Amino acid sequence: MNWTLEVMIVPVSDLDRAKAFYADQLGFNVDHDTKIDDETRIIQLTPPGSGCSVVIGKGAVPDMPAGSLRGLQLVVPDIHQARAQLVERGVEVSDVQVLGENPSPQPDRLDNVGFVFFNDPDGNGWAVQQISSRA
């Protein structure tokens, strides 16, 4: 039986600001933005190529302090290209960092060990890791 992770809830303080950040700056697809009533709104966004979405909302999602998540991680095949895209879209992102030593530096020496880091407008912490191919 496959167990797939499909949704991560990300706590934010301003839904419209967060939606703009994730959609316009990160390039996530807006799957839906559903307003049920004045107190309930759910927005689901999915990174291109991902099987897992993020949900931001109010009312129908667990109440967590905005900005309290750390360690959310995206994976890309080219960390330099991903960083350039984030910078172009106005995201404050770290320089490429090498964390650890890659025991198998083929096909690319940055695979598994190349990272960049950024925060969303509320301070939720994201990492982006390079994995150019999977065995």
Image (cartoon, helix red, strand yellow):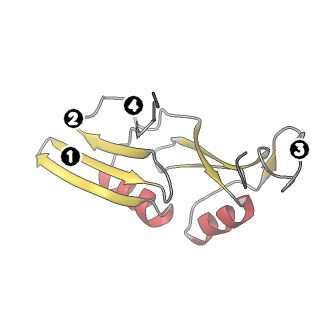
Disc 4 to disc 3, C-alpha distance:
40 Å
**Looking at the picture, how far across and down is residue 16, in whole percent?**
31, 56
Q: Which mark is residue 104?
A: 3
Marks 1 and 2 sit apart, C-alpha to C-alpha, by 7 Å
Give the distance between the C-alpha atoms of the residues marked 2 and 4, in whole angstroms.
15 Å
10 Å crowding of disc 3: few (<14), some (14-19), many (20+) = few
Q: For the residue labelled by badge 2, is the local secondary structure a helix, a strand or a loop?
A: loop
Q: Gap in Å between the C-alphas at discs 3 and 2?
A: 45 Å
Task: Kindly give the residue lying farthest to the left in the view shown.
Answer: 37
Q: Which residue is mark 4?
A: 65
Write down the residue under mark 2.
60
Which residue type does callout 4 highlight?
Pro
Mark 1 or mark 2, earlier in chain: 1
**What is the three-letter code of the residue carrying label 2?**
Ala
Residue on which the image places disc 1: 41
Q: Residue furthest front?
A: 1
Q: Quadrant of residue 11?
A: top left
Q: Quadrant of the C terminus?
A: top right
Marks 4, 3: nearer the viewer? 3
Taking the spot 45% from the left edge, 27% from the top edge, the residue there is 1
The residue carrying pointer 1 sits among few (fewer than 14), some (14 to 19) or many (20 or more) residues within 10 Å by Cα, namely some
Q: Kindly identify the amino acid type of the residue bearing the numbered disc 3.
A: Ser
What kind of element bears circle 3? Answer: loop
Among numbered discs 3 and 1, the one appearing first in the sequence: 1
